[in-house]
Amino acid sequence: MDTQFVGSDAVADALEAMRKALGDDAVLTARADLDEFRDPFYVLGSAENDVSAAVMPTCVEEVQAVVRIASAHGVPLWTVSTGRNYGYGGAAPRVPGSILVNLSKMNRVLEINEELGYAVVEPGVRWFDLCEALEASGGKWWSSIPDLGWGSVVGNSLEYGRGHTRIGSHAENVAGMEVVLPNGELMRTGMGAMTGNKAWHAYPFGFGPMVDGLFFQSNLGIVTRIGWRLMPRPEKYASCWVHFDGDDIIVPVIDAMRDLMLDETINNYPFLGRGVAANTEGQPDLDPKSEKWALRFALYGYDEIVEAKWKIVERVLGSIPGVTLGRKMFDGTDRVGPQEGIHDDKVQAGIPGMELLDLYKVPFGPDTGHLDFSPVGPLIGSEVLKMVRLVRGMYEEFGEPYAAGMMLLPRSILVVSVMFFDPKDAEKTKKIYENYDPMLQRIAAEGYGLYRAHIFKMDAVAATFDFNDHAYLRFVETVKDAVDPNGILQAGKQGIWPKSLRGKAKS
Ligand SMILES: Cc1cc2nc3c(=O)[nH]c(=O)nc-3n(C[C@H](O)[C@H](O)[C@H](O)COP(=O)(O)OP(=O)(O)OC[C@H]3O[C@@H](n4cnc5c(N)ncnc54)[C@H](O)[C@@H]3O)c2cc1C
């Protein structure tokens, strides 16, 4: 799928230097160790995007050493925090033969600020670790979390990952970063650019242009710590749902949800699912002919506020014909009740788990893989229905079941759908990846772009962002050439290539 860019002598020399700097144990080269970093959601056993080695730094100075050595030897690096980016490539690099910088050993929660409600974390801190630390410090603060607890706060946030509480827009929760630049220098963003600044993680801006955005979905640096906002534990939490049959009801439901989100009656990030992603009664809906949709959302706050909000929700959503509505109420201090409920109850209460991965294994057993197709649209009922029909029509054309898992923001929606396959079936797996290409072209032709993409599809997705002959890409490439002239960091990520490799990638 790609050209082999990496010279083996350069890699061997770089690895030797890394062993000297970090110690033998920090450099993995045994095939069995490296297999773990393959994308488990591609052809089982495929070596197409193998790394040549993995380094496991334990501190910032070691990350700096790795970057400087890679730069001196012209060897590409691919960074992961915990490497659980499943559905988008896992830990596998865009450029085969890259050295993987795996930050999972830098896993300290450096601070929990009890007054201001933020945590400071290293890249290897998983959702499980952060939530455990929050509980241990008294449980006054909740974190937002994605569906699975084994990924990292840093990796997920840098990918514009999403969670399902009031603070579920993860990139927006990042306040203040520390970054190792491609020349090995260490930089702090925002107020952190001042030595000893007291408001680094409390005030996200700094003095001058805000450069944090350059490190999201990017290849301009390795992020070694972030400030991360928390939400106060609410007195009450209501886990709510709306069920309906048939696509047409999407229109009034989405329009009502937009109003309820914009006026902050509902202030979490709701989720609308269908098929295996619709977690109606804790069970996936596997019937491909099923027309059932399940929307979940949450209400948080003082008892009186949650009750008042629920009355408004009942009035607005309950008046839509064909809709059934329900809720479960929990005390904010109750961490057992939501755990004993379904996945939705937990995830909207910031309690991490792994049960959704098990549900996603239903289609083809333990090896089940999936490829996510993730276009963004405006949160307007008629537009969402149009996107659903377009995407669903393509699944029908390809003879695949349509499973949707859509994330609502107050003004936009991620119309994510999931293509399931059995990675043991090489032909079928490759077909699924091929199906993605016409889907991308058709959705882009209608004016919708993707928010995230698998490593194999990054060039194709980047090409759809084509305004003024790709002015955006040319600007980012100019920045890339300036800060990473040797082109060592994350080559090809999001379709951004260093000068030396530009135009040479095959996909
Ligand atoms: C069943 C299922 C449910 C899922 N649900 C969700 C969900 O609810 N929300 C969601 O957002 N995703 C979801 N995902 C997708 C994915 O699993 C998560 O986003 C996961 O958290 C990402 O893995 P990670 O945190 O280990 O990131 P990593 O794999 O560590 O990082 C992802 C990418 O970010 C970049 N990166 C990572 N760390 C750094 C760093 N320190 N410096 C610079 N760049 C870096 C790299 O390009 C890397 O490839 C789901 C996946 C599955 C299979």
Image (cartoon, helix red, strand yellow):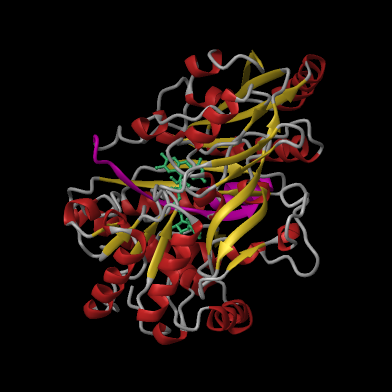
Quadrant, the C terminus: bottom left
Above or below residue 324? Residue 245 is below
Image quadrant containing the N terminus: bottom left
Q: What stretch is highlighted in magenta?
A: 365-388
Q: Is residue 437 visible?
A: no
Q: Is residue 372 magenta?
A: yes
Report the front residue among 206 and 285.
Answer: 206
- Would residue 492 appear left or right of 336 to someone viewing this image? left
Residue 462 placement (x, y as % from top left): 50, 71
Task: Identify which residue is drawn at 64% across, 14% down.
Answer: 330
Q: In this view, does 315 lie to the left or right of 393?
A: right
What is the number of callouts on the image? 0
Q: In which quarter of the image is residue 50?
A: bottom left
Residue 479: x %, y % from top left: 59, 79
Q: Is residue 403 magenta?
A: no
Q: Can residue 124 be seen in this view?
A: yes
Which residue occupies 71% across, 31% down? 114
Q: Is residue 464 above or below residue 420?
A: below
Where is residue 461 drawn, in percent x and y?
48, 67
* Residue 34 or residue 109, whichever sits in front: 109
**Residue, x 63% and y 34% (percent of image)?**
165
* Residue 258 higher or lower than 182, as above or below: above
Q: Where is residue 37 in the image (x, y as percent from the top left)?
A: 29, 53
353 w.r.t. 111: above or below: above
